[in-house]
Image (cartoon, rainbow, N blue to C red):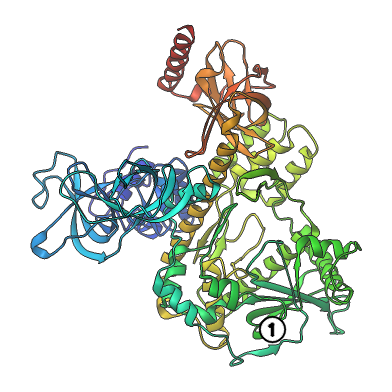
Amino acid sequence: MARRKAGADETPTLTREAVLRFVADNPGRASKREIAKAFGVKGDDRIALKHLLKELQEDGVISGDRRRFKTPGALPPVGVFEIRRRDAEGALVAEPVTWDRLEDGDPPSLPVRIDRAKGQVPGVGERILAKVVEAGEEGGESEAAGERYLKIIRVLEKRRSLSLGVFRAVPGGGGRVEPVERKQSEYMIPPGDAKDAKDGDLVEVEAGPRRRIGLPTGIIVEVIGSVNSERAISSIALHAHGIPHVFPKAVLEEAEAAGPAGMKDREDWRKLPLVTIDPADAKDHDDAVHAAPDEDPANPGGFVVTVAIADVSWYVRPGSKLDNEARLRGNSVYFPDRVVPMLPERISNDLCSLREGVERPALAVRLVLGADGEKRRHTFHRVMMKSCAKLAYEEAQAAIDGAAGDVDPDIVETVLKPLWEAYRLSRQARERRQPLDLDLPERRLKLDASGRVEKVVVPLRLDAHRLIEEFMILANVAAAESLEKQRQQLIYRAHDAPSLSKLEGLREFLKSLDISLAKAGALRPSHFNQILARVKGGDNEQLVNEVVLRSQSQAVYTPDNLGHFGLNLARYAHFTSPIRRYADLIVHRALVTALSLGEGGLSKEDEELLAETAEEISRAERRAMAAERDTVDRLIAHHLAERVGETFDGRIAGVTRAGLFVQLPTYGADGFVPIATLGNEYFHYDEATHSLVGDRSGHGYRLGDTVEVRLVQALPLAGSLQFEMLSEPRELPRATGSFHKTSKRGRFKDRDRNVKAKVRRRR
């Protein structure tokens, strides 16, 4: 599209090119509002702008959210950087602190210009506020053309960062630490600073005194154990993704100084028989539930459901050290071998955990359900409660099913049975609402006593799980409704509808299965559910579930109410897990403020920073998910490293221009089959059908196909598996020919790769 030349009183035409140019020319202020203002977008044209921005994000040419778009990889003119290492010449090298690796890849590394006259002499691990200077600017002539460096404005933190590496001992004591991450520095460990590390141990090392020549020195601060252990593998993910996992001393001291909450501003609910229902190995319990028939004659057959949530807002006050650390972490991170909590154990596992038989402060909501399961009204209360029982999901389910167990029969009759009856009502309302009903089994790793992978299991999905999930959803909706009614700002959990481009891709895919998809304007979760029901029990069930999942938008935290498409809800906010999610803590504070429930409410600074907080915790959530996924990949690669050469039954879980991702259902692990190894013909990527198609035979491989593969390589520290395809390509039901859209250059690259592979095989 051509861009009209704008006169003095004209605005530029809204085109892809013009928007990209505006984002590039306005780093730090290219919000949706500013873009609309620059292009004179008003009224219904805002919808077109929204779709255009979504498409640009999906194409990877811009990143960010509606409050700040940017060119992927672009740096703001001024920002906060952390000094990571020294280069070969001894110069400091820094990386941006706020950098989204999932969207923008690896962060850029820039040299730091030191001005010793101003006393600006930071070290490795310290943070600086700095200006990005292009070569030739502000005395930057010494740099090569096109290079950039950082000019320090202010040193922000005097702290040292920890690096992870493998210790290699040398004769005479001491040794070297080889970094796990390629971009980290290698350290020389002097004798006496090795802290009993043995050769091959995974260690955390702190930068030591600076040296003018040679490798930087380091001091080993913790010996994690053998590089082959599973705990070492989860540590790699923590460092690779920059997840804070060591609480500063001041934060721990503040947590230890906290004492039990009193009855001030609280209702006494200690006699209400609330119960906690959690995983069997749960250490913190942040929600408890209760249900009873509604005694109001105006609501025959109705129930009153109570959901009580740990009152974290009482202990973690705005601006405190605990609060600053919780905001930095954003959420707890869960690995197979450990949990990295958002809050210290004194808070998460003790003072705030709703332990059986112990008085605990809570923020509770009473939900009145009608006989049809619909919520009629609700009220929030700040209370003191005492859980009457701590149950695991399996225990609660067995008790309600009549199996013999350790659950008190009185608890079963007076607490569990009313809960299940109330759930039966709410399930009816859920079925009428029709949220997105994807069926994708969750796999979990079971570790043995030594911390090694023993097996991979698919936990049973019980009604006990669904009951707690449904009551938590009701409580979250109630929180959002109450805050909106009080005109109180909050952070929503938003899930936007699928983008037009993703829907078009899904429509093309379903067409190849003779399944039609309604037009985008009328799409609701129920339309997807009809498709999922149609393939249920068939050969394409798993395939269609995964492709539908990939078509969905990613849920985010935002101060703007975008609704929740997946749950089919007009408003939704996370309220029920403040021990492990900072978003829930913000919602708790907002309720305390809006409903005048006492101390610990939302501060003015909290309100002013809601947009920034939402962005930070969304980023922290993506970071945690990536770290958890990487750890599972490394654990499985470690588990299979001794089985190279064996054959496995797998399923194609991903199709790209470069090759196939094959998942081993037994392990839930993905490995890669390079396209160059597939066969003696050239394979083309058919995007619409998620397949690789041979150009001569028309046979190929498709997403969801069951295949047999041989494991040819396993790299535990990288979490990488590589397979050789043993199954012959099959005749595909119907190719769309969409591969012709791939550039000739890309196809020639694939062809060249195949030719080179053939030459290597002949040799």
Q: Can residue 607 be seen in this view?
A: no
Residue extending farthest top: 762
The image quadrant that residue 402 belongs to is: bottom right
Q: Residue at x 78, y 58 (%)?
A: 431
The image quadrant that residue 296 belongs to is: bottom right
What count of labels does the image hold?
A: 1
User: Which of the two residues, 517 or 568, is positioned nearer the viewer here?
Assistant: 568
Crowdedness near tag 1: few (<14), some (14–19) or many (≥20) residues, C-alpha within 10 Å: many
User: Which of the two residues, 585 or 474, is positioned nearer the viewer here?
Assistant: 585
Q: Mark 1 points at which residue?
A: 385
Q: In this view, does 415 lie to the left or right of 495?
A: right
Q: Where is residue 542 in the image (x, y as percent from the top left)?
A: 71, 38
- Tell me the amino acid under the disc marked 1: Met
- In the rendered view, would you say 424 is above or below 680? below
- In the rendered view, would you say 397 is above or below 627? below
Q: Can residue 589 be seen in this view?
A: yes
Residue extending farthest front: 172
Q: In this view, does 389 lie to the left or right of 112?
A: right
Does dot 1 land on a helix, a strand or a loop? strand
Q: Where is residue 688 in the image (x, y as percent from the top left)?
A: 59, 30
Q: In which quarter of the image is the N terminus?
A: top left
The image quadrant that residue 369 belongs to is: bottom right
Q: Position of residue 491 (x, y in %)?
A: 52, 68
